[in-house]
Image: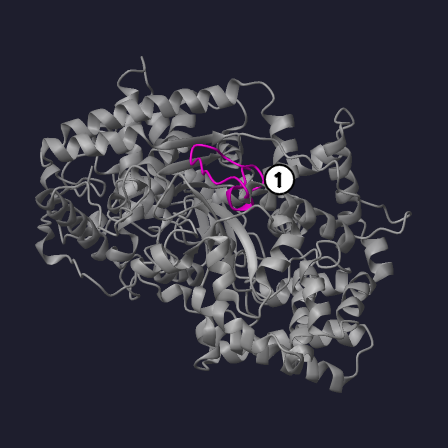
Amino acid sequence: MIGKKWNVFRKTTSILLLVSLALMSSGCGNKNSASGLDTSSQEAGISDSSGEPGGGKWVDSDVSGMVNPEDNIRLQDDFAAAANKDYILSASLDPAYEEASIVLDADKLVYERCMAIASDETMTDDNALKYKALVDLHSDWDERNKLGVKPLEKYIIDIQSISSISELTEYQGSLDRNPFGLGLLIPESVGAQLQFPDKSTLNLVAPSLSLGSVSSYVEYTANTLSAKERCDEVIGYFLGRLGFSEKEIDDILKGNYKVETFIARNSNIDYFNVSEMFTKAQNSREGISALQGDYPLLQILDSRGYLGCDNFYVDYTYLSSLSSIYTEKNLEDIKSFLIVHTIDSTKYLLDRESYEKMVSLYTKSAKGHEGLSDGQLGVLFRNDMKICGYLPLLDTLYLEKYFKDSEKTDQVEEFTDALIKAYSQILDEEDWMSDDTKTAAKEKLQNMALHLIKPDNVADYSSAEIKSYNEGGNLVDAAAEGMRILEAHRADISKNPNFDRFKWDIYDESRTTTEINCVYYTGENGIYIMAGYLAMCDAAYGEDATLEQFAGIVGTTIGHEITHGFDSNGTKFDLYGRQFDENITAIDWMAVEDRSKMDEKASKLAGYFSLARPIPGQQKVNGNNIKDEAIADMGGIKSVLYVARNIPDFDYDEFFRAFARQYAQQTTKENELDTIRGDVHPLPFHRINIMLQQYDEFIETYDIKPGDGMYLSPENRVTVW
Ligand SMILES: [Zn+2]
């Protein structure tokens, strides 16, 4: 019942640093807490005016109404406001998200393209026909409304028919009856082993919980209560429509919460130390067999297709607790849990009434907004494809239609090569690093896995049986087929004991190339540049963007992801993505004195951001929260500027304007304050102004002088690289 992965569109914008889940679920990730080292600002030694970025000459141009037609804003004083003035003045906010942005524009463009695939008569292979059949099921609201919530019924009746623990085991093990993979321990993904990055492991996880996090079941907060109210409402709504009595609904909810409370209280994976991760969580088949006791995990997995997989990563304490709940006495409660989670898996796949209800309950959209906005259509469509298990099919067809000739892919590959070369030079020129650290840094750079636009395989959905409404089909059954295909693939690759971080598997829905995003995975030392991100450039400039425009949007973002390998967090991982070697000894390729110099630079950067109070009278920025993203932004620009030195007649003005356009946005003050409080990325107008003022090329292009808002003297600049 966790809708939060997509409930705030703004948080999924561009360049989130995602942390691979296999890798330290315990939080070496991007969500730095506000506490910890406070770096702060005093010693930043800023002398330009008050020290505040912009010296009082910037407005928060992300917020609607801050820039007006009559304002005469100089590029030299507030580049974000001046360069994006045309966008700002013509922007109309999407009513659901209260936002206008290039990200949202790109999202709409990708959605239009997804629809165009469905109506493209020249695409006639089996994959295309499957996708068209699916889109027909998805978009035909008349038929969906006629069926109402009926498609859910047979899955629930099947669960109700279970009359013993052995039947429950049979149910859990059946791909056919249990296509959504429900159960007490779930084979979620195949990734690298923490201690041996070239060996694979099947990651087993406890199911998601209706109230969100494990802690919700330990101490009740206002959030727990509202999550419970929502869950009760959703389950009551669907079961009520299926004719369940209030008493039956109440019993199902109670049974579910009992099982979920057990799961929450016995889950410890987030608290494992390195030794537990390496020696106890990582298990062979024999190890699992010893841990599982009376819980038939291997039997369930094997009948779902995992026979032959011999490496498992599991919450070993949770697994050994399952014997105690898996008894006849608890059978009805576990069935209730399965019913609730079946509804959770299918709640967006039924009729319009339920769909709009779920959207309003699970997505953060503007108060009082009704129906679905244009911006939501694309976001919801992708979400629906994902929960149906068809993103790999969509990705395959998108690449087939829009990246058929190699021109765009070649451009990304060539530019990335040039950025890697530039980066090597940048590392070489850092006079604060010792030679040994430089050599190690360059080795990490050269071993970075570059995943550009196209995964290494194409999806094959030929075995999916998608029946039309006339043939008695519906979207829930189609989703069951999609989920079976994904799991069959997962089972298949789990048998390969080797892991290759240079390979990009199109079936891995966490790395979907149609997303408007790019990612660096610390645990793999690898970047993913998504085809969807190129739509940012198309949305801003059409498909004939110049090289400088491409460099300003896509180039800087590739550089940004590369830099994540060298930010405060990323530098703690080695060229294979490891933090510890197989003897559980910490690996640090940076010499101690080099790391402390780098920390000092990062502190100075954080301190500079912490001086900013974007909205007068409101809170300041917490520089520590956003420092790694800011380091990445600056590294992205710098590496492109190095590449530009070798491009004849490079138009710097066009490049800097395109960089600014990437982050053009209009939103409300409330949304902006949410971003200040919760996002690990700097505010969009800071991503423009603070990042650009660090570079001579920018200062020179616009003849920026001391006293101008964009001026920052060389000694006060805060770049790390
Ligand atoms: Zn980032």
Mark 1: which secondary structure?
Answer: helix
Left or right of 211, for residue 567: left
Q: Please determine whether, in this image, residue 317 is positioned above or below residue 402.
A: below
User: Mostly what secondary structure, the magenta segment?
Assistant: loop
x and y percentages locating residue 28 in the rendered image: 32, 55
Left or right of 577, for residue 623: left
Tag 1: residue type?
Answer: Pro
> Does the rendering let one see residue 696?
no
Q: Nearer the viewer, residue 299 or 338?
A: 299
Q: Is residue 184 magenta?
A: no
Q: Nearer the viewer, residue 98 or 34?
A: 34
Looking at the rendering, which quadrant does residue 347 occupy?
bottom right
For this orientation, the residue located farthest to the bottom is: 247
Q: What stretch is highlighted in magenta?
A: 495-513
Q: Please determine whether, in this image, residue 274 is positioned above or below residue 305.
A: below
Looking at the rendering, which quadrant does residue 405 occupy?
top right
Q: Please determine whether, in this image, residue 176 is positioned above or below residue 77.
A: below
Residue named by callout 1: 392
> Does the rendering let one see residue 663?
yes
Dividing the image into 4 quarters, which one contains the C terminus? Answer: top left
